Image: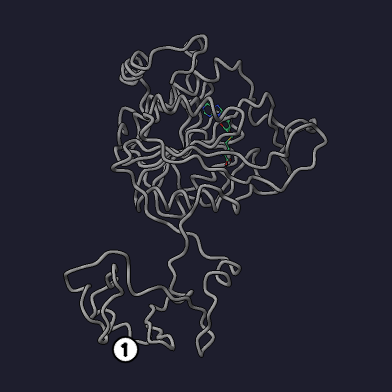
Amino acid sequence: MDLQYPGKRPLAEIREELLAASAEARDLPSDFETGLAVTGDNYEVMLSLLRKFAGKIDLIYTDPPFNTRSCFFRGEDRVSTVSHGKSDRVAYNDSMPMDQYLEFMRVRFCLMHLLLGESGSLYLHIDNRAGPYLRILLDEVFGIDNFLNDISRVKCNPKNFSRAGYGNYKDVIYFYAKNRDQVIFNGVTESYSEEDIARLYRKKDARGRRYTTVPCHAPGESAGETGGLFRNQLPPPGRHWRYAPSVLADLDEKGLIEWSATGVPRIIRYADDAAGKKIQDIWLNYKDPQYPRYPTEKNSEMLEMIVRQSSRENSLIMDPFAGSGSFLSAGISQGRRVIGIDSSPEAMTVISERPELRGLKFADMSRAGVPDPDAL
Ligand SMILES: C[S@@+](CC[C@H](N)C(=O)[O-])C[C@H]1O[C@@H](n2cnc3c(N)ncnc32)[C@H](O)[C@@H]1O
C-alpha cells in the first residue's frame, strides 16, 4: 500500500539524511530532572534529541495541526478560531498544501520512530479528514504489523449544524507500537459505571453487596487434578474444574461458592472486587475542556490514562506538538520524565505558567532563540 503525492521521497533517503543531520544538530540540555520544554520547530529539536535520546523514549503522544485551513487565536480570557478580538494573538496557523503537509508529517514520524525505544509506542491524535492519509504514512514508517488500534474519541457534545452530512463529534487516535511483541501495555482498566454494575452484578448478598456468579467448570476434560472430585462431585461430562478442587474448597469455606437448590456450585464474584473493565476502542468519556487555556487543548484525564497505560514509572515520554502542555502535565502527575516541543511562543507561555510544569528546564531553539549570525 503506497500513498502517492508530489514531493514524496524514499524513506531510506529520509532516514539517512536525518541521521546525518542529527550529527550536526545543536546540543540541547540532557541533564534535566523532571523534563524539558523546547520552543522551536520539532524537526530541528528532534534532530538534536536524536544525539542523546535515540531509542530512549517509551511513549510519544502527538496531536499535530490537522491542516484544517484555520488560524487559531488566543486572547486574555478565551481561545478561538474564526472570530477573534483585535488584541488576540495567533497561537498557530494550520494551513498547508496537502502534499507538503503529508511530507511534513512523514518526516516527523521518521524522527519519532528513531527516538522510540523497542518497547515504545506512538499515539497520533488526528481528525477524520487528515487521519486516513496519515494512517497510511504510519503504516509505511512503523510497519503495518505494528498498528495496534484506531480509537474513536468523542470530542464534544452532538452538533446540530444545518450543513449536509451527519454531525461530527469524534476524532481519531492511531496507536502504533515500535515493536508489537515488546510494547509496554499495562492493562489499565476503566471503572464500571453504576449502570454497568446493575446490569452485570444483578444479585445482592445479605449485606447488600452486589455480586454475580460464574460456573466452577470450563470446557474440556482433564485427567489431572481438575478432573477430580470436588465435594463428592465430578465436573460435568466434557468439562473440567476451573481451579483445583482444594482451591474450590477454600473458596467454599470463605463463602465464595453459591450452591443451587439442586446442588450445583457456582463461584461468587463481587462487584466491589472487580478490577474494572477493559478499555475498548471507542472513548466516550474524554470530551475536551469547555474553557481551554489554549486552542485544541485535549482532555487531561484521557492523557493521564494514556500515560498510565503505555509507559512506566520514570519512563521518558514526549509530546512534539505540545500546545498547552496538557500531556506534559499528565506525565508529571504520573511520575514520568517529559519532553515537550512547540514552535508557538504562545504555547510556551501557557506551558511555563502551569504551576506543575515550573520544574521543567526550558530551552529556546526557535529562530528568535538562535543568534542571528548577521547581527554578530
Ligand atoms: C493541535 S495543537 C496541540 C494541542 C495540545 N495537544 C494541547 O492539548 O494543548 C498543535 C500544536 O502544534 C504546534 N506546531 C505546529 N507546527 C509545529 C512544528 N513544526 N514544531 C513544533 N510545534 C508545532 C502548534 O503551535 C500547536 O501548538
Quarter occupied by the N terminus: top left
Badge 1, how many Cα within 10 Å: few under 14, some, many 20+?
Answer: few
The residue at label 1 has a CB less than 8 Å from ligand 1: no
Q: Is 307 situated left or right of 102 in this image?
A: left
- Residue name at image x 43 percent, y 85 percent: 260
Picture quadrant where residue 159 is located: top right
- Residue name at image x 69 percent, y 39 percent: 168
- Between 59 and 337, the one nearer to me in the picture: 59
Q: Is 309 situated left or right of 82 in this image?
A: left
- Residue name at image x 64 percent, y 25 percent: 93
Q: Is 13 situated left or right of 293 in this image?
A: left
Q: Is residue 68 above or below residue 232?
A: above
Q: Amino acid at mark 1?
A: Glu
Q: Is residue 187 above or below residue 120?
A: below
- Between 204 and 262, the one nearer to me in the picture: 262
Coordinates of residue 87 in the picture (x, y in percent): 77, 32
Coordinates of residue 343 in the picture (x, y in percent): 54, 28
User: Residue farthest to the front?
Assistant: 237
Is residue 62 in view from this perspective? yes
Coordinates of residue 107 in the picture (x, y in percent): 44, 21
- Between 26 and 107, the one nearer to me in the picture: 107
The image shows a total of numbered marks equal to: 1
Is residue 256 in view from this perspective? no
- Residue name at image x 32 percent, y 72 percent: 217
Q: Is residue 280 above or below residue 366?
A: below
Picture quadrant where residue 227 is located: bottom left
User: Quadrant location of ligand 1?
Assistant: top right
The residue to which callout 1 is attached is 253
Q: Is residue 252 above or below residue 372?
A: below
Q: Mark 1 falls on what kind of element? A: helix
Picture quadrant where residue 171 is located: top right
